[in-house]
Image: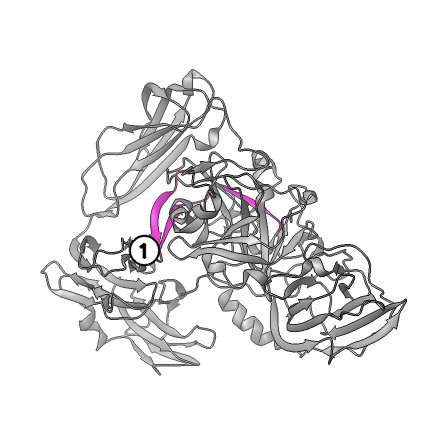
Amino acid sequence: MTRFKLLWMFLALFGLSIQASAQITYGGVPWTEGVRPEPLTMPTLDLEALAAEDEVTDRYKEAPWRFGVEHEVSLNAVDHGAWTTEQGHRVWRLTFNAEAATSLSLRFDTFRVPKGGQMFVYSEDGSQVIGAMDHRNIKDWGGLAIGVIAADHLVLEYRQPLELEEMPELSIDQIVQGYRALSGWPHLEDRGPFGNSGACNINVNCPEGATWATEKRSVALITQGGYTVCTGNLLNNTANDGTPYFLTANHCLGNPGSWVYYFNHESATCTGSNGPTNQSISGGTLLVNSGQSDVALIELSQTPPADFNVQYAGWDASGVTPSNTVGIHHPSGDVKKICFDEDSPSQQNQGGAAVWYINEWELGVTEPGSSGSPLFDQNHRVIGQLYGGVAACAGSVNNGQPDWYGRFDVSWGLGLSDYLDPSGSNINVWDGYPDGAVTFNNDAGVSITGSPEGVLCSTEQILIEVTLTNTGENTLTSCMLEYSINGGAPQQQSWAGSLEQFETDIVTLPVFTSQAGTNTVEVSLSTPNGLADENALNNTTMVEFTSYEGPTYDYTLTLVLDDYGSETAWTLKRLGQTLYEGGPYPDGVDGEEVIVDFCLEEGCYAFRITDSYEDGLCCGYGEGSWTITDPNDEVVGTGGEFGASEQIQFCADETLRLSDLEGQTVQAYPVPTSNEVTVAWPEASGEACVLDAMGRNIICESVRENQTTWSTEAWAEGTYLVQWRSDAGRVIMTRISVVR
């Protein structure tokens, strides 16, 4: 399944006069006073229908944020437009009219012009111009994507000297008609040309981002067609040769050859909402992509010129857990932003991908459009790219929810090393180019690397391991640790030893007994070498885990792998929250068993298993299977022969099972459905939630009637889970199938 955490792009720039450039261009101005043919009129859009669709998809980072409607066309310089002779040149013009459009853009599927020919794209009044584009803009794939013009009338103008006998080959296969308007945005000056993000985001040029002025120059915004696609960044390689390798997320992929990459789109101030759009490159070639870490590596079609002043970021492929992380990105199409997590991320699996799990951002968040953006460690090196998450602004503060980034160290073995280490030196840590990473003389970091995993079925003895890392250039010989358990009085523990730069040591905290419910351990570091720490961002870390206090039930998953364990992943969720997950696994281990014990509270759960190749676990490439058993060793679900995924629901309770409920309780009709579904509830009180196949809440609302009717027109085709919880806590589930 393709997943997107994509960018919102608003392009309503009424009255704004700009000189646009959507790729590297080569000077000149169009002849705006020349003969223009009658414009081709674009269709009137059904804005209400578009708004209804956007209302659903705009809620999720995994769905693309649409700013325009893509029209597939077939237009060329032979059969369309008009040719004239002007000022010793052959001139071809083609015009478009899309009344009330917020923007227009287009894509050439064939762009081949002789040396001496020039192409311009501009607004009717000539205030916005892209060009000139000439033979140097010809791409390997044969076409050329043109950036946006914030106007509802568009003019294409091509010219070449009369003495030039070779004629151009020009054909257009797509026109994008922007429709997102300014409703809800009272002040035009508060908007950027590509969109706006939430109020809790931080401009990269705010004081908080002062030490990231080098790395920010590697980050770019990506657009394609009617969508702003993602964020990404340039990466250095061990040859330090400035090859334009560009990192983003696998789930962002469409056609990188038709993408437009905008660099330095940032506000010069901490409060500004606008930035330049005249430093961009059109096109790139996909080199590496994999869902195992949600990675994509692209080589841009052209090297950014010197006046772009770009940075090729450094990276760390060691897999060492950082003490803190920073993200630089373009949320919702906005100018470049920065966010900070002061804690160590954890290594997890999300949707079959190996990820760094960011529990919560302390400053700033990410949004749709941030996908593919780099995650930097405390040493200013890239360790991953944004895969997805649920972090967002809640007014002027963040919502305290997590994000996850595909791990660079996993991507390294999936093909990145072939390009980023061309000599095969086996180096796995490398600084940026032309400017190196920020370093400190006296700096130490702390992270929690050993703590309980999953849920504890009861209170028990807990041992916490803390990793110290010398992130400074001076040898680390001493420091002080301070820790607090479950909000108790801070305790101190001194450390002494000898660590060279990037060396680590494990410190074990005193054993303690967990409490029922949520447990919190906070650790901080101070006075490395008896001096002030020059970098405080990596000095604190925290971990949380849960011990159940009520009745619990022991369930077991027995997973038999096939030949391609790397394709297999699974989750166990309750009310959309992932409690346990696993995969991907090694390849070539057909028949090997993986045993996972679940400690579950009373309630109902959803187990989902996926295969990225969409051929299940059995039986073409091995005899794989899965089985879940209850505390009495009775099978509650089993399978293995499926396509992309299969899912079951079950209830952990001594007396109540899902099979007992299905026949007596929640009734939905019609099933399957295409337009709407009505669900009858056992009681006229409670809460109802609808979850999609990924376990995400589509709807959650109070039930105060005997039945509820939902429109399903905007829902994607597939299976949905309906969960009803009574005011007394009774949980019942059923399924809804949506077909088209």
Residue type marked 1: Thr
The N terminus: image quadrant: bottom left
The local crowd at label 1, few if under 14, some if 14 to 19, many if 20 or more residues have their Cα within 10 Å, is some
In the picture, measured across the screen, residue 292 lies left or right of residue 338, that is left
Instruction: Count the labels in the image.
Output: 1
- Residue 63 lies, in percent from the top left, at 48, 63
Is 59 placed above or below 309 here? below
- State the image quarter where residue 343 is shown: top left
- Residue 102 lies, in percent from the top left, at 69, 66
- Residue 678 lies, in percent from the top left, at 37, 79
Part of the protein shown in magenta:
335-363
The C terminus: image quadrant: bottom left
Colour scheme used in the picture?
one colour
Q: Which residue is mark 1?
A: 578
In the image, residue 161 lies in the stretch drawn in magenta: no
The residue sitting at 57% across, 48% down in the picture is 244
Q: Is residue 333 visible?
A: yes
Is 675 placed above or below 490 here? below
The residue sitting at 24% across, 70% down in the picture is 641
In the picture, measured across the screen, residue 535 lies left or right of residue 184, that is left
Q: Nearer the viewer, residue 150 or 587?
A: 587
- State the image quarter where residue 718 is shown: bottom left
- State the image quarter where residue 108 is shown: bottom right
* Furthest residue in direction top, as rendered: 530
- Residue 560 lies, in percent from the top left, at 19, 60
Q: Nearer the viewer, residue 225 or 244?
A: 244
Is 213 placed above or below 101 here? above
Secondary element at image label 1: strand
